[in-house]
Amino acid sequence: MSDVQPGVRPVFDFDGSLDVAASMWSLATSLQAGGKTRHEEWDTALEVWKGNVGDLVRTYIEDDKTDTTNVINVLQAEAKQWAELWAKTVDETNRVLAAEAREVLKAHRDSADEGFQWHDIDDLWDKGEKKDDQAFDIPAAAPIATPQSPSFGRPRKPFANYERQADEMVLDGYLENVPPY
């Protein structure tokens, strides 16, 4: 987590990206359905058109089938990529939220050290140990699952919610939206 900086949250349209993915998948499904209807019409056309014109129609039909299949495959692949990008960005946002929580905990402990009283000598060794970077470990959020086709439904509450409790930082559940700074 040392390479993730607090406050540098990814800029991303979390809702819009999954809407785009679902729309792309829906368009691909519509193209598939339309292609099946056209195939029946093409079979009829090939029965009627013979000779050179029939060969030309057959070439057009094969080109259309290939082009339609390619467009469908690209739309579905792009939709899946949008969903994968959504999941990666949620995970990155959660890493940044953990880095922010770490900074909050550091600031709290630093301000607590400023008020140190010598009669708290029993706590001296504990405070010294907490200065160690490992003592600032923040629990990581669970990786988010990639939304799946055809709906690309957004998982509920994907964003980590960190809360300071006494002298520790805990992962206090998840939120529907990215928490404010």
Image (cartoon, rainbow, N blue to C red):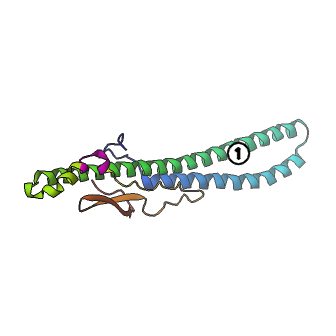
Q: Amino acid at mark 1?
A: Thr
Residue 73, percent across and down? 66, 45
What residue sits 48% from the left and 55% below the top? Answer: 144
The residue most toward the left is 118
In the image, the segment drawn in magenta is 129-135
What residue sits 17% from the left and 56% below the top? Answer: 123
When the figure is inspected, residue 77 is found, relative to residue 33, above or below; the finding is: above
Instruction: Give the image quarter of residue 108.
Output: bottom left
Is residue 54 one of those drawn in magenta? no
Q: Is residue 97 left or right of residue 129?
A: right
State the residue in front, 32 or 87.
87
Residue denoted by label 1: 69
State the residue in front, 177 or 24.
177
Q: Quadrant of the N terminus?
A: top left
The residue most toward the front is 122
State the residue in front, 56 or 173.
173
**Total number of numbered labels?**
1
Residue 173, percent across and down? 38, 64
Instruction: Give the image quarter of residue 15.
Output: bottom left
